[in-house]
């Protein structure tokens, strides 16, 4: 598989830089409605998703759906945001059982943590966010 050129590369030293990073990601989304977040445990995937939801106007308590697999949030305008965490699934059959395609192809924004667990189910037009951590520096790379 050939990886396309990076669409955006952002460096964040602390949480103060997170709002600007989230805005840059939202500005680069285009028409993609599924965003896959890659990164090691503790890289900041959920924290970044919290900021993205906040900027989209959600006042909901955004938390990692590690055990529930999926949380639903609403923006102030009533739009739905689906937040998935596939860390604990053991097979793609579990994603099928929860009806992932009803969410991924709904047109609503889907934010997916641990997408590597279901890589064959991700839509082709998925936006990928890669978060790497080195010391106190987080590098966020956005690819289409």
Image (cartoon, grey):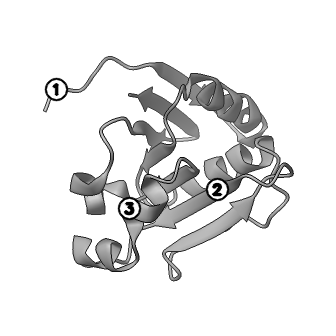
**Which residue is labeled 3 in the image?**
101
Q: Nearer the viewer, mark 1 or mark 2?
A: 2
Q: SS class of the residue under badge 1?
A: loop
Residue 92 to residue 118: above or below? below
- First in sequence: mark 1 or mark 3? 1
Q: How many marks on residues?
A: 3
Q: CA distance from mark 1 to mark 2?
A: 30 Å
Q: Nearer the viewer, mark 1 or mark 3?
A: 3
Residue 38 to residue 4: above or below? below
The part of the image, by quadrant, that contains residue 28 is top right
Q: SS class of the residue under badge 2?
A: strand
* 88 or 125: nearer the viewer: 125
Q: SS class of the residue under badge 3?
A: helix
Q: Position of residue 142 (x, y in %)?
A: 46, 29
Position of the N terminus by quadrant: top left
Q: On residue 2, which mark appears?
A: 1
Residue 137 horizontal side relative to residue 112, left or right: right
- First in sequence: mark 1 or mark 2? 1
**Which residue is labeled 2 in the image?**
81
């Amino acid at each position: 598989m050939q990886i396309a050129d990076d669409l955006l590369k952002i460096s964040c030293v602390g949480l103060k830089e997170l709002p600007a990073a989230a805005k840059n990601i939202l500005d680069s989304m285009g028409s993609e409605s599924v965003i896959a977040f890659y990164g090691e445990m503790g890289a900041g995937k959920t924290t970044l998703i919290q900021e993205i939801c906040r900027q989209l106007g959600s006042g909901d308590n955004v938390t990692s759906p590690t055990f529930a697999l999926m949380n639903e949030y609403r923006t102030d305008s009533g739009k739905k945001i689906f937040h998935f965490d596939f860390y604990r699934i053991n097979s793609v059959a579990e994603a099928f059982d929860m009806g992932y395609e009803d969410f991924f192809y709904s047109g609503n924004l889907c934010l997916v943590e641990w997408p590597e667990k279901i890589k064959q189910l991700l839509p082709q037009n998925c936006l990928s966010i890669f978060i790497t951590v080195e010391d106190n520096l987080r590098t966020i790379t956005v690819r289409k």
